[in-house]
Image: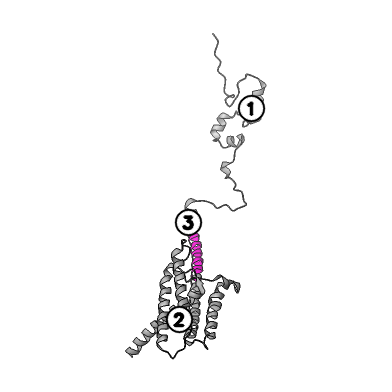
Amino acid sequence: MPQIKTISKWALASAKVFYRYLAVSAEVFCRHTFGIRYMNDIVVSFLIFFIYATVVGCFGQIKSPFLNFYLGCYFALVCFHIVSMLRRQNSSVHSYSSGAPWPFWHRFCAKPMVVDLILEPGFLLVVGLLLVSHDDALAIWFQLSALSLFFKRAVSSWKKWHHLMDVLDTRVEGEQLNEAVRQRTVPRARAATGAIPVSMGQASEPPQSQLPQSHEQIFGNLDPALRQIITPANSTAPNSNSRASQSNSGSHEYGGPLAHLPRIKSPRR
């Protein structure tokens, strides 16, 4: 049992590595503008295909007339991508980018997911099926590359969708937390400051104590004893009209709030 577990563990790891670089070998022909740190995967995928071509060449029973030609094209494309990555000046491309589809793919469909999951793997699968009767080794490589590319793109799309859902959920949770914090802090702040909220569209009325008062109201608010001293016994509270008439009459008689008191006269010398 331990030996079977160890063998299955190493076999599964080897299958993952082989599946990954098979997909990269398909991307070399179907894509361009790779990230600078994707260069290692491209070089390793070429080395794996070189080993595959060497092993096939050692067995003369497998017919592969186009294998060497494909190996030369593969090497030329790898050199082209490496030179393009090294000569690139802008940093807008992600360093781990697996490339962008060639422009002619957009003539068939404008949706990137359709190009990734259907057009590119489908093209490689059709080429592999056409080579079955002419080159068995290269046909097997194309078919395995097409399947690996499809699974790689499907897993990448699934992860991207989950990442997008996580970002949207985080945004919704942030808005909910913000609303909860605002509901808990705003009433306390109003109670502490004593501020009265004013609704939009309603003018705030000043308190009654801040309104301007007339002379009668001011006089009425005085102490009764003070009013009795100021006001004559047979008169009412002074008003603005009586003051105005006295000022315009031109008389020099003494008036005012102390007019009821006896006037002191001193003999003139």
Cα gap from disc 3 to disc 2, whole angstroms: 79 Å
List the residue tagged with mark 2.
68
Q: Residues within 10 Å of mark 1 (few under 14, many from 20)?
A: few
Helix, strand or loop for disc 3: helix
* Towards the viewer: 209 or 13: 13
Residue type beneath disc 2 = Asn
Residue type beneath disc 3 = Arg
List the residue tagged with mark 3.
188
Q: Residues within 10 Å of mark 2 (few under 14, many from 20)?
A: some
Task: Identify the residue shown where x is 50% and y is 60%.
Answer: 183
Range of the magenta residues? 165-184
Which circle, 2 or 1, is nearer the viewer?
A: 2
Question: Is residue 179 highlighted in magenta?
Answer: yes
List the residue tagged with mark 1.
243
* Towards the viewer: 250 or 73: 73
Residue type beneath disc 1 = Arg
The extreme top residue here reads 269
The extreme left residue here reads 2
